[in-house]
Amino acid sequence: MSNKSGIRLLLACMLLILVACKTTKIDTAQSVVPIQVPLKKIVANQQQIQTINASKVSFSIPMQNQQTPLRGSIKARIDSCMQISIQALFGIEVARIHLTQDSLILLDRINQQYVAESFSSFGSTFPVSFRMLQAIILNRLVDVTTKDDFSDFLYQKDENLHIVSYENSNFAIQYLVNDALHLLRTTVRDAEKKHYMMAEYQQFDTYNTIVYPKKNAIVMLFSQQQYAIDYSIEKVEFNQQIDLSIVIPPRYKQILLADIAKEYFN
């Protein structure tokens, strides 16, 4: 596969993350009891992080029985802005995804085109929030409750794993946490069980007092097709000054996110 095809596939997979974050509902497990401890420890770890700069990231996309490797970076100012940069040989940027609380910009430097849309413009087609994407990509809990005691979560212990679930009128989500209180998996399903998204996190390392995973995978089932992105973080720094600016070249043509969706998923 050419680098150009691989890059466009990665952009399509990132689009799927936007598509797959629909309002959802999961069947909660039997024999559940109120949760008290596991999520508090994870939240305490999250609260130490103001910025993330994963300056060296290896992406891997399964395609035609082989892995398509790409390089890039992930930067974020928590609850404010996030950027994913995709790079070709010699670190030349070929694509960038820029997310804020109310909008997204997608730069396709190969084809000299871009998407610039607000989350509210997605309507029922793309009902997604910045905080949902932030949580899935950055190993964080989805911000779904204002209760500090997590009394509206359900909890089940299975050997050395904690299964935690939450459901409201709009969506439900399930977490898998180990005894070390690392968030290992986040799963989201839609009400009709036609779509799901699962993020898995492995190889946790400690950076001073911050615990963070090196290996990550996002698997999506959408329109009866499964898509996956693996990404390994080789270098990461926390709570440093980062540049999250973005400039759209005037010669770039603006297109709609729906145009990309039609190209890949119809």
Image (cartoon, rainbow, N blue to C red):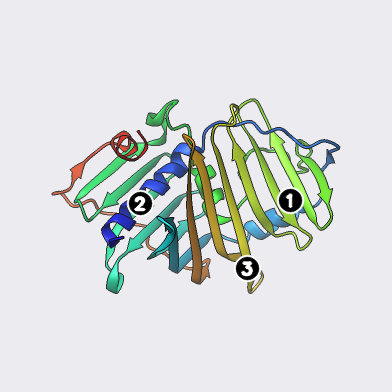
Q: Which residue is drawn at 76% across and 47% down?
A: 163
- Residue 78 placement, left or right of 68: right
Q: Nearer the viewer, residue 36 or 148?
A: 36
Query: Quick one: which residue is furthest to the left in this view?
Result: 251
Q: Identify the residue position indicated by label 2 in the image.
A: 9
Q: Which of 108 and 63 is in front in this view?
A: 63
Label 1 or label 2, whichever lies nearer to me, is: 2
Q: Earlier in the sequence, mark 3 or mark 1?
A: 1
Q: Which of marks 2 and 3 is nearer the N terminus?
A: 2
Name the quadrant containing residue 1.
bottom left
Indicate which disc residue 203 carries: 3
Task: Say few, some or many: other residues with alpha carbon within 10 Å of mark 1 (under 14 / 14 to 19 / 20 or more).
Answer: many
Residue type marked 3: Gln
Task: Say few, some or many: other residues with alpha carbon within 10 Å of mark 3 (under 14 / 14 to 19 / 20 or more).
Answer: few
Can residue 101 be seen at all in this image of the molecule?
no
What is the spatial separation of the Cα atoms under label 1 and label 2, in whole angstroms? 34 Å
Instruction: Identify the element where label 1 is drawn.
Output: helix
Indicate which disc residue 39 carries: 1
Residue type marked 1: Leu
Residue type marked 2: Leu
Query: Quick one: which residue is furthest to the front in this view?
Result: 65
Instruction: Identify the element where label 2 is drawn.
Output: helix
Q: Which residue is drawn at 34% across and 40% down?
A: 264
